[in-house]
Image: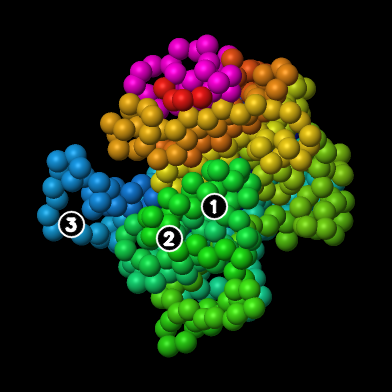
Amino acid sequence: MSEKQFDLIVIGGGPGGYVAAIRAAQLEMKVLLIDDRTDDKGRPAPGGTCLNVGCVPSKALLDSSKHYHHIQHDYAAHGIGVKDLSIDVGQMIDRKRGVVRQLNGGLLQLFKANKIEFANGRGKLKNGRCVAVEPVEGDPWEATGKHVILAAGSVPFTIPNVEIDNEHIVDNVGALEFSSVPERLGIIGAGVIGLEMGSVWQRLGSEVILFEALKELLPVVDPDVSKAAARIFKKQGLDIRLDTRVASAEVVDGKVKVTFEQGDNTKTETFDKLLVAVGRKAASEGLLAEDSGVQLTDRGQVEVDEHCRTSVENVWAIGDLVRGPMLAHKASEEGVAVVETIAGSHGHINLDHVPWVIYTDPEIAWVGKTERQLTDAGIEYRAGSFPFAATGRGLAMGEAQGHVKILADAETDRILGAQIIGPTASEMIAEIVVAMEFAGASEDLARIVHAHPTLSEAIHEAALSVDKRAIHKAN
């Protein structure tokens, strides 16, 4: 078994791992990146869950289904008529696969351009920063790094009495590969994955029922956003059943029979497909040899400090493997921060200012604290909000649902949090993230000139509303 020496070994080629590897190569480190994912033809497929079976392909399907839905329901208002509308699910899936494959290839080219050694296989950390590599093809070998970054990502949670076969009962991977539109689709979990995938297939014609064990939809956002989302999703046709626990699911004659509990009542529903979307857990299984010395938490995450250092010197962990939100952009920035720290700089990521997004229609995005969190912490604040229905651009686009809300410290006016439900919320939240990162106040956003007519004017007016001086609504 041959052994190679590197300045940095990265285990995991997702948005945390590959970004860390590229940044390290830019800083003239000798880098080995290990990732075992392959596509349906056995070719290397770096990019992790996000690129291959998560963020990117789901957005491709969301985009396709949104076009189809708008043609069906919204284009007539613009004077546009379409006859004999149809959907070719196979073509839609092929387009999604093409987007993924193009990005896979782009990453492989980046590795080559940055002189990163890429190993398509599994990596396991042993004692002394030695990594055992089990290639997809070829003989095993070992490498030793001056530093090692663990970036193996996460895997879906499973639940008792619901066995995933990715044909009838599927996880997020199976939900991206349906060959036809299921007549009835059940979803366990009304979080990010459940709502996004439910939106895709409902727009294309499925009857979608989501089972959510919690009593409130999206408790991570404020009630006004949650209630607005619930109203909009119900109007769109999503049947979201809160305070409902799935007891079991079984495949009977090609259908999925789901048994669930609502209060004291036990009921059943039958579906063509069932998606299990109850969250994800750190992919730490098989990552560490017994003598690695790296400590795990009781939840299976890698134990790290605020700088992503593990219990072993010069071994680091980032992304879904560690504390904090399981978000691709958080993983990427942690990767950069770790590499720059290794290089003697001052790498840093502020977990309090990481934006969250749900890519439904309308989109939902938020950053910082919610009103509930501020109240619970005893922090006095002021709130300002503004509806997209009062923006000229929103009405002109036919995208007038939702609002922007900004929360600011009652004394200093520093922005403490913000939430957006509405068109392009995923893009607009960045303006508020920048303001928060530079300790900006709501007055700062209120003083900035925003182009007219734009959707971002809603941010301007919400900032004005914090001081009860919004122009285009009664305060």
- Going by the numbered disc 2, the residue's amino acid type is Leu
Nearer to us: label 3 or label 2: 2
Magenta-highlighted residues: 444-471
- Crowd rating for badge 2 (residues with CA inside 10 Å; few <14, some 14–19, many 20+): many
Asked if residue 448 lies left or right of residue 411, the reply is left
The quarter of the rendered structure image containing the N terminus is bottom right
What residue would you read off at disc 2? 238
Q: Are marks 3 and 2 in contact (CB under 8 Å)?
A: no
What residue would you read off at disc 1? 192
Q: Earlier in the sequence, mark 3 or mark 2?
A: 3
Which residue is painted at 41% across and 46% down in the image? 361
- Going by the numbered disc 3, the residue's amino acid type is Leu
Q: Residue furthest front?
A: 474
Is residue 50 something that shows in the picture? Answer: no
Q: Are marks 3 and 1 in contact (CB under 8 Å)?
A: no
Q: The residue tagged with tag 2: helix, strand or loop? A: loop
* Residue 152 image point, x, y percent: 66, 50
- Going by the numbered disc 1, the residue's amino acid type is Val
Front-most of residues 340 and 114: 340
Q: Is residue 4 above or below residue 96?
A: above
What residue would you read off at disc 3? 85
Residue 373 lies in the magenta stretch = no
